[in-house]
Amino acid sequence: MEEEPRIVGLLVLYVKDMHRERRIMPYIHAQDGTRLFYSTWGTGEPVLFIHGGNVGSGVWDFQVPALVAKGFECITYDQRGFDRSDVSATDYSIGTLAGDLDALIGHLDRPNLSAVTLSFGGCVLARYLKQYGSEQVKRAALVSTVAPFPCRSEDNPDGLDPEQAYEPFLRGMIEDRAQTFLDSLDLFFNPEGAENPVTEGARTWIMNFGLRNPLVSMLEIYRASFFEGVRADMSAFTMPTLLVHGEADVFAPLTATAACAQRMIFDGRLITYPGASHGLMFTHRNRLNRDLGEFLKSALERRSAA
């Protein structure tokens, strides 16, 4: 098993200006004034990480240090309503979140940018590419994606039944969020299929994300992930794209999400992990970090040789 990389970098940067230290606050403002927190680690080719619902940018704790050690600059941000970003009273639609992403990418001004998404983050990236163009994103990786549309329909028979999946979980979050998340941990991690042991610490780590974010933003993102869909946006993935998905993912069934997405992406490659569920960024972190590093470097080499 690979050795866990040593964490390097700082979340808050300082510069000296006119012989005094001036603190740079790592926030940008979205179009409606909502503040979005972001952080950068490392130096090298830039990689932007986009988290999914119910969590925050800290969900990438096990990927960022590994990729920094491989020579990448890693950029994470909290989507509106989550962790250190502002909570907006309304509008958590995919289009609004894509606008937030556009504001961040414009602020960062990083050429040759790669994007790595988790779960619902893949929908946000798809909408961004469709609405604002793909010129700024040179490579993309979708991990445990719910794109293009996780809900069961006539043309998506392997999707999730809203009456069996969406409505009970929604009701559980409203009535007793803590117990609902606690009851779903084994489904999220699938410890029996994990390559990295699911410790009590890991359970506490993911639970903390679910409980410290406002319920209203979590409910809105959950609704958007189930019912909005981005099937019309998938053709905007014109860059080399890697899809990594667990074969035991009950939150985003493989055949209804990543397998469909691959068929909609011109240069898409799908890797599946036997025994992995939705939380593979933890349970299969060494394999995922290796696959992400190899993909990002190979895609960069392909682009340089073109």
Image: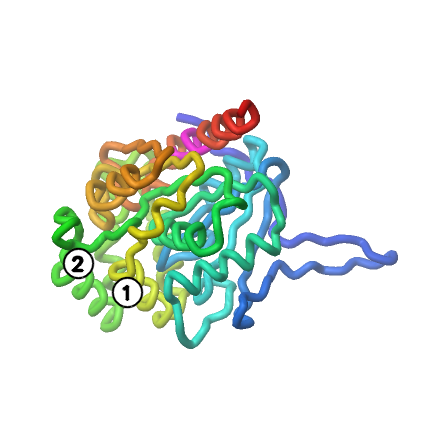
Q: Residue type at mark 1: give it.
A: Arg
Does 190 sit left or right of 67 as displayed? Answer: left
Label 2 CA crowd tier, 10 Å (few <14, some 14–19, many 20+): some
Considering the image in quadrants, where does the N terminus appear? top left
Q: What secondary structure predominates along the stretch shown in magenta?
A: helix
- Give the residue at mark 2: 165
* SS label for mark 1: helix
Q: Residue type at mark 2: give it.
A: Ala
Q: Which residue corresponds to the image point at 48% horizontal and 61% vertical from the top-left?
A: 99
| The magenta segment | 288-292
Q: Is residue 305 magenta?
A: no
Does 107 sit left or right of 149 as displayed? Answer: right
**Way the structure is coloured:** rainbow
Is residue 242 visible in the rendered image? The answer is yes
Residue 86 lies, in percent from the top left, at 50, 69
Q: Which residue corresponds to the image point at 46% horizontal and 71% vertical from the top-left?
A: 87
Does 236 sit left or right of 173 as displayed? Answer: right
Q: Residue furthest right?
A: 19
Marker disc for residue 223? 1
